[in-house]
Amino acid sequence: LRKDYPRVRQLLADQRRALQRSLVKFKLQTNDKISVSNNHGTNINDYYLIKNTLSPLPYLSALLPQDQMDSESTESMEDETVANVSNRTQSLSATDDGEM
């Protein structure tokens, strides 16, 4: 059993690295990327940065069930939520000023 431990540990480390590499390759294929070098993707060995895309409400996609809703209704719900949040902040600032 003691002889197998280093081998099993090495195997798990190799699997973890392979999984990380495959996830990075998948993200590079599916997301926008920025080339670190100036030749813009002419070489396979180029280094890329995955372009960060910001969402106004990043937690909303985790809360909404995506398989039951189409993208149009999700976008309209996000717009309504952003409008509700801005209305609440405006009403809170108005009550802080004593206007209401």
Image (cartoon, grey):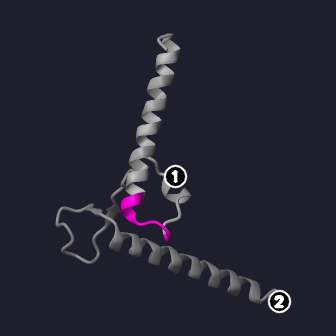
Kindly report the distance in space between the C-alpha atoms of the residues bearing marks 1 and 2: 45 Å
Where 38 falls versus 97 (above or below)?
below
* Label 1 or label 2, whichever comes before in sequence order: 2
Front-most of 75 and 21? 75
- Which residue was labeled with disc 2? 1
What span is in magenta?
A: 67-73
Q: Which picture quadrant has residue 29? A: bottom left
Where 3 falls versus 30 (above or below)?
below
Numbered tag placed on residue 94 in the rendering: none
Residue in the image at 41% along x and 66% along y? 70
Q: Label 2: few (<14), some or many (≥20) within 10 Å?
A: few
Name the secondary structure under disc 2: loop
- Which residue was labeled with disc 1? 59
Which amino acid does the dot numbered 1 rest on?
Tyr
Residue in the image at 23% along x and 62% along y? 37
Where 63 falls versus 92 (above or below)?
below
Which amino acid does the dot numbered 2 rest on?
Leu
